[in-house]
Image (cartoon, helix red, strand yellow):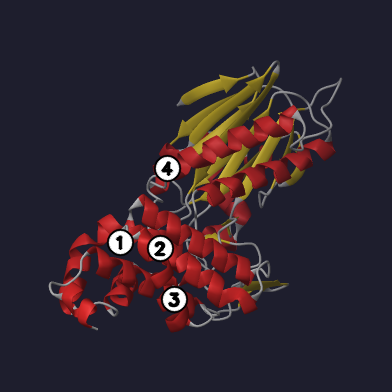
């Protein structure tokens, strides 16, 4: 199916599990593709192919023989394997985003597919394999085995670029992708840090290859860089919303913000309940969703997680951990109870009980105590106020 044509230079088509672009004029192409990757002239097609299902089906031919795989997927679509550069993914091609951004006679088009639920990671996370002359050596359990999840970007620019500028587009596009993951609070699945991408992200960038003036800069200060950033950000957000139902509204969750520190729905509920009596714990179970997604509660949890990062990154000194985290945790208690008059009481209790939260488990325990303090004041057990007055 012919989707559309941009700047009389590239036709975009979708067929079966593939989206491909057919060049209507010569293009200079830079890509991370395994075959015909790097900087190339003379390519006729570029494509993004759904090579496997998200779970339960892995196309091992990709790893065994890339040339055989390329031939296998190109020929049924009428694409010459020797003139086509492509990417593979488990993402559904029907969830692709097509975004164009223009300024005067300059146009940037981003065609993006993506999925990050299981394979999101942070640069520097523990690796799972080491490449050698004989293949890939598995390093697990040092590194967690990768799972399906990839952000694939095809970027088309309607003006000729120098080779250096074409290379620079990859940096700008990658920064835009990472900015989206930051805005969506996507967690690494391999460490306790915010995700910067997935372990299998790929990119193809193409611009007309003709005589005459060529744009020489694709950084953020230039209009080309701005358009790349805007197009890629919009496309990544759209495709993740389609593929993973990952939206800003959906990420308004205390649990999601604590997930990378080792929190699950079950451990969060159990952790808070450990500081409540039986009746309050039952009430928590019936009201968990409302508390988890309450904006004031999410804001307080997000602030705690951010402070935890600041300590991990060395911006805040560990010697101030107790007083800083106790004050922030007290804000969480207030958000839940709506008793801001008790801020100082909460801070003193949390500061005395928690100690310095140096590990992720310590940090989560502080959060659970703060949740429980606020919840106890919001829904006190009958008779609790009289007992408090007598104590």
- Which of labels 4 and 2 is toward the front? 2
Lower position in the chain sequence, tag 3 or tag 1? 1
Estimate the spatial distance between the alpha carbons at disc 4 and disc 2, rounded to whole Å: 29 Å
Q: 258 or 47, which is in the foreground?
A: 258
Q: In this orientation, does residue 49 appear?
A: yes
Q: Residue at 12% x, 72% y: name it.
A: 382
Lower position in the chain sequence, tag 4 or tag 2? 4
Q: Are marks 1 and 2 in contact (CB under 8 Å)?
A: no
Q: Residue at 40% x, 63% y: name it.
A: 332
**10 Å neighbourhood of mark 3: few (<14), some, or many (≥20)?**
some
Lower position in the chain sequence, tag 1 or tag 4? 4
Image mark for residue 180: none
Image mark for residue 241: 4
Q: Is residue 59 rendered to the left or right of residue 296?
A: right
Query: Mark 2 sits on what residue?
Result: 332
Estimate the spatial distance between the alpha carbons at disc 1 and disc 2, rounded to whole Å: 9 Å
**10 Å neighbourhood of mark 4: few (<14), some, or many (≥20)?**
some
Lower position in the chain sequence, tag 1 or tag 2? 2
Tag count: 4
Q: 346 or 203, which is in the foreground?
A: 346
Q: Tell me where residue 108 sits by quadrant.
A: top right
Estimate the spatial distance between the alpha carbons at disc 2 and disc 3, rounded to whole Å: 14 Å
Q: In this orientation, does residue 27 appear?
A: no
Image mark for residue 337: 1
Q: Residue at 25% x, 77% y: name it.
A: 276
Secondary structure beneath label 2: helix
Estimate the spatial distance between the alpha carbons at disc 3 and disc 1, rounded to whole Å: 16 Å
Where residue 389 sits in the image (x, y, percent)?
Answer: 22, 77
Q: Tell me where residue 282 sits by quadrant.
A: bottom left
């Amino acid at each position: 199916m012919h989707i559309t044509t941009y700047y009389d230079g590239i036709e975009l088509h979708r067929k079966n599990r593939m989206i491909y672009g057919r060049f209507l004029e010569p293009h200079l192409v830079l890509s991370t593709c395994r075959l015909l990757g790097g900087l190339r002239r003379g390519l006729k097609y570029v494509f993004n192919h759904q090579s496997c299902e998200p779970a339960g089906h892995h196309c091992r031919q990709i790893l065994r023989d890339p040339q055989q795989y390329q031939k296998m997927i190109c020929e049924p679509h009428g694409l010459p394997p020797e003139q086509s550069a492509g990417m593979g993914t488990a993402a559904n091609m029907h969830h692709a985003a097509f975004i164009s951004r223009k300024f005067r006679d300059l146009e940037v088009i981003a065609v993006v597919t993506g999925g990050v639920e299981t394979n999101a990671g942070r640069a520097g996370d523990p690796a799972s394999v080491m490449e050698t002359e004989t293949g890939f050596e598995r390093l697990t359990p040092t590194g967690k085995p990768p799972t399906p999840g990839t952000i694939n970007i095809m970027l088309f620019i309607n003006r000729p670029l120098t080779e250096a500028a074409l290379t620079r587009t990859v940096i700008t596009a990658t920064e835009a992708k990472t900015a989206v993951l930051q805005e969506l609070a996507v967690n690494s699945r391999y460490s306790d840090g915010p995700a910067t991408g997935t372990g299998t992200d790929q990119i193809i960038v193409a611009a007309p290859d003709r005589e005459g003036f060529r744009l020489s800069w694709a950084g953020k200060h230039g209009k080309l860089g701005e358009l790349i950033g805007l197009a890629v950000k919009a496309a990544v957000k759209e495709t993740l919303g389609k593929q993973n139902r990952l939206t800003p509204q959906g990420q308004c969750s205390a649990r999601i913000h604590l997930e990378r520190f080792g929190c699950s729905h079950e451990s969060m509920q159990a952790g808070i309940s450990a500081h409540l009596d039986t009746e309050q714990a039952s009430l928590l179970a019936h009201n968990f969703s409302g508390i988890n997604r309450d904006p004031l509660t999410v804001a307080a949890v997000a602030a705690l997680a951010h402070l935890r990062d600041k300590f991990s990154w060395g911006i805040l000194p560990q010697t101030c951990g107790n007083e800083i985290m106790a004050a922030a945790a007290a804000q969480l208690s207030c958000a839940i109870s709506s008793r801001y008059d008790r801020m100082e009481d909460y801070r003193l209790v949390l500061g005395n009980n928690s100690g310095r939260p140096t590990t992720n488990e310590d940090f989560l325990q502080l959060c659970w105590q703060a949740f429980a303090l606020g919840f106890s004041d919001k829904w006190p057990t009958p008779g609790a106020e009289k007992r408090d007055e007598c104590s």
